Image (cartoon, helix red, strand yellow):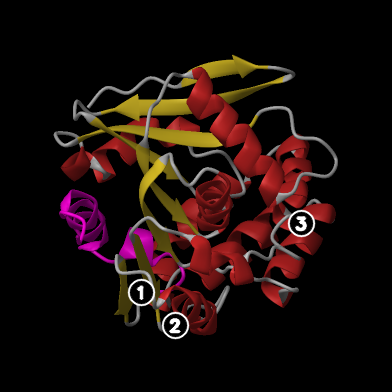
Amino acid sequence: MSVTVKKVALNGFSMEYITFGSGKTPLVIIPGLSVQSVMPAAEAVAAEYACMASDFTVYLFDRRAEIPEKYSVADMSRDTFAAIDALGIGDFCMFGASQGGMIAMRMALDHPGRVLKLALASTSARVEETEIVRGWINFAKKKDAGGLYLDFGKKVYPPKVFESFRGALVSAAETVTERELERFCVLAEAVCGFDVLDELPSLACPVLLTWSDDDAVLGAGSASAIAGKLWANPGFETFEYRGYGHAVYDTAPDHRERLRDFFLKEAKK
């Protein structure tokens, strides 16, 4: 599948995105925190989500290109929604993973009439502080791209997957620029202090929450806390994977099909 990275220009900033698929319903995907942008892997991303292409028109958004010195999750949500509006996207389904899930929650809370269904994976609604993310920030501040990539991979993937990716992570680290490390620090800082937990009961759209029991980044307790706030939502569904790590949304072989089935399922009356 041939996919081109596009850019939308807004007031004071721009944002890259990719789009593919021919379905009537828009599906917005917001990826998690990463050392480098996922945009160069646009064709691989589209191939991974090929099961969505006939039922949805998929839009995957990067973070804005011009990152300010301080940039909160609420800021990311506001800017992403501005890009969605600028592209003329109507009501949409949305999937957010990890930090992308935080952005998605904030967006769904701020624009309840626009989000048809919301899927969240390996995310948290309240992060007071995390040693894992703080460690990544320290690697980036020391300009240690190799240490950052290896620690990132070790925490995000289960051991066997990490070992299979180790060489690729080392090679990727060699391409990281100083600007990318500075950008990563700003984006990672936004995780610490994020909190929408007590707002979650106001979510009216159906929600799917997935996680893995061995999430070493945010912990399975983060998913339990979200579930505790959404139990009264008639469209709320959860699924716990075992042994797939924080990046369960990439490592579990059926995760994308699970998302597709949730988005296509008729809402409960």
Relative to 139, is 218 on the left or the right?
A: left
Residue placed under numbered mark 2 in the picture: 214
Relative to 235, is 28 on the left or the right?
A: right
Check disc 3: other Cα within 10 Å, few if <14, some if 14-19, many if 20+.
Answer: some
6 up-or-down from 111: above or below: above
- The magenta-colored residue range is 244-269
Residue 123 visible in rendering: no
Residue 39 placement (x, y as % from top left): 48, 32
Q: Residue furthest front?
A: 269
The reply to whether the magenta stretch includes residue 144 is: no
Residue placed under numbered mark 3 in the picture: 189
Q: Which quadrant would the C terminus be assigned to in this image?
A: bottom left
94 up-or-down from 54: above or below: below
Q: Earlier in the sequence, mark 2 or mark 3?
A: 3
Q: CA distance from mark 1 to mark 2?
A: 7 Å
Check disc 1: other Cα within 10 Å, few if <14, some if 14-19, many if 20+.
Answer: many
Q: Which amino acid lies under the numbered mark 2 shown in the image of this protein?
A: Asp
Q: CA distance from mark 1 to mark 3?
A: 25 Å
Residue 109 placement (x, y as % from top left): 55, 52
What's the mark number on residue 244?
Answer: 1
Q: CA distance from mark 2 to mark 3?
A: 23 Å
Q: Which amino acid lies under the numbered mark 3 shown in the image of this protein?
A: Glu
198 up-or-down from 36: above or below: below
